[in-house]
Amino acid sequence: MFKSLSVASVFFSLVVSGTLLAGPLGIGTTATDEVIAGWDIDVRPDGMGLPVGEGSVAAGEGLYEAKCASCHGLFGEGEGRWPVLSGGEGTLDTLHPEKTVGSYWPYASTLWDYIHRAMPYTAPQSLTDDETYSISAYILYLNDIVDDEFIANKETFARVKMPNEANFYVDNRPDAQNERCFKNCADPKLFEIVTTINGVTPTGHFKEDSGVAANHYEGNPSAASEVGTSNEISTTKIVFSDTAVLGEGVYDKACQACHSSGIAGAPKTGDKTAWVSRIEQGMDILNVHAINGYQGEDGVMPAKGGNMSLSNDDVINAVAFMVESSR
Ligand code: HEC
Ligand code: HEC
């Protein structure tokens, strides 16, 4: 809705005159068709949005092993605590439901969309359409939903039926249940959070100056450390070695996704307490762990952070940057 008539008429005159001014305030730029296409990547259950291209289960196997297995396991069983992608049939109505692509997801289109949009975790949107078809086909194959001859393309993919589809229904409730308040409304500044659900609701960001990152979960204090008030590493007083200087760019690209916030048990860069005993192991061990990956007590460090395009030296440099930031 337009706020006032005058704003509405400015819009109107822009459209009429055909000028490509960036809105009434003259800021920003007009989205081109190309820019819009970059955002318009959703794939719908009926297959709308799937691109031209194709991929096979066989091609998917090699791609999956190279780009996905370090986190999701060779057969989709999940390394450590990374998400499981296969199995779990018949467990949904038990005490320990295992929700996987095969047991839970209602539409194959979601698999294509999700992988194309978000995976691999450390390099989202790096896969080509054909690679995405192949890897999706392979994951469907791991779940016994298609056979090993399956060729995925626009037509065949849209026809795949997922085992759990029937248990989903369209939720047409309104997004907000409450009436909107227009007069005598309570002042939001006076709202107070009196309770949170243990282990579920993030609380860190509610406490001002608490020094606890927003990923601190009540009931799981080890998820965040008490060091520093932000995720930025304080680098002001550190004189970095040449190796570490080289490593900073690699770190930003391939390691900070986990190590700047400490998700999934990753030791937070800059958190001296989290690093002291790790550093005591010596650089050689740290480097081997970072290059080959390993399962520790806090979680799984995927080989090269899941980014197999890095050279060993890239990883060694990044480790130097992390260690020198954390002493
Ligand atoms: C560095 C580890 C890592 C790598 C490598 C990786 N993933 Fe993931 N994957 C994750 C994480 C973490 C999540 C959960 C993300 C979330 O819930 O926000 C995830 C979620 C998924 C899911 C959704 C699982 C579910 O049931 O919700 C799929 C499907 C998936 N990944 C496929 C892939 C594919 C295909 C590749 C390779 C092209 C890949 N992943 C590579 C870490 C990884
Ligand atoms: C997907 C999340 C993730 C990414 C990305 C990631 N790490 Fe890790 N890393 C972890 C986790 C989790 C641990 C802790 C494992 C444990 O000790 O239980 C860890 C631990 C480490 C350690 C400590 C090893 C030790 O022996 O104590 C080093 C060094 C390390 N990572 C380096 C890196 C480098 C370098 C990169 C980027 C190239 C990187 N990590 C990317 C999750 C990640």
Image: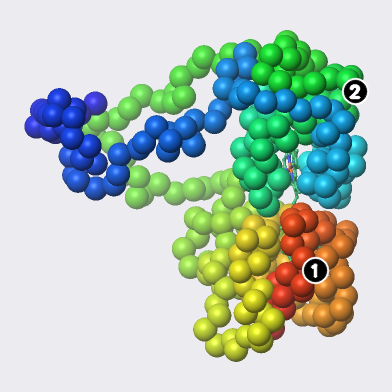
Q: Is disc 1 placed on a helix, strand or loop?
A: helix
Amino acid at the residue labelled 1: Asn
Amino acid at the residue labelled 2: Asp
Question: Mark 2 to mark 1: distance in Å?
Answer: 35 Å
Sequence-wise, which precedes: disc 2 or disc 1?
A: 2
Residue at image position (87%, 62%) is 292
Q: Please give left or right for residue 122 compared with residue 90 in the image.
A: left
Residue at image position (75%, 69%) is 315
The percent position of residue 13, horizontal first and vertical second, equals 12, 29
Instruction: In the displayed orientation, state which residue is furthest to the front.
Output: 53
Q: What label sits on residue 312 in the rendered view?
A: 1
Identify whether 171 is placed above or below 192: above
Q: Please give left or right for residue 174 compared with residue 228 in the image.
A: left
The percent position of residue 288, horizontal first and vertical second, equals 87, 70
Residue at image position (34%, 50%) is 189
Q: Quadrant of ligand 1?
A: top right
The percent position of residue 316, horizontal first and vertical second, equals 77, 74
- Picture quadrant of residue 262: bottom right
Q: Please give left or right for residue 190 compared with residue 87 in the image.
A: left
Q: What label sits on residue 148 in the rendered view?
A: 2
Residue at image position (73%, 69%) is 314
Identify whether 115 is placed above or below 88: below
Q: Is disc 2 placed on a helix, strand or loop?
A: loop
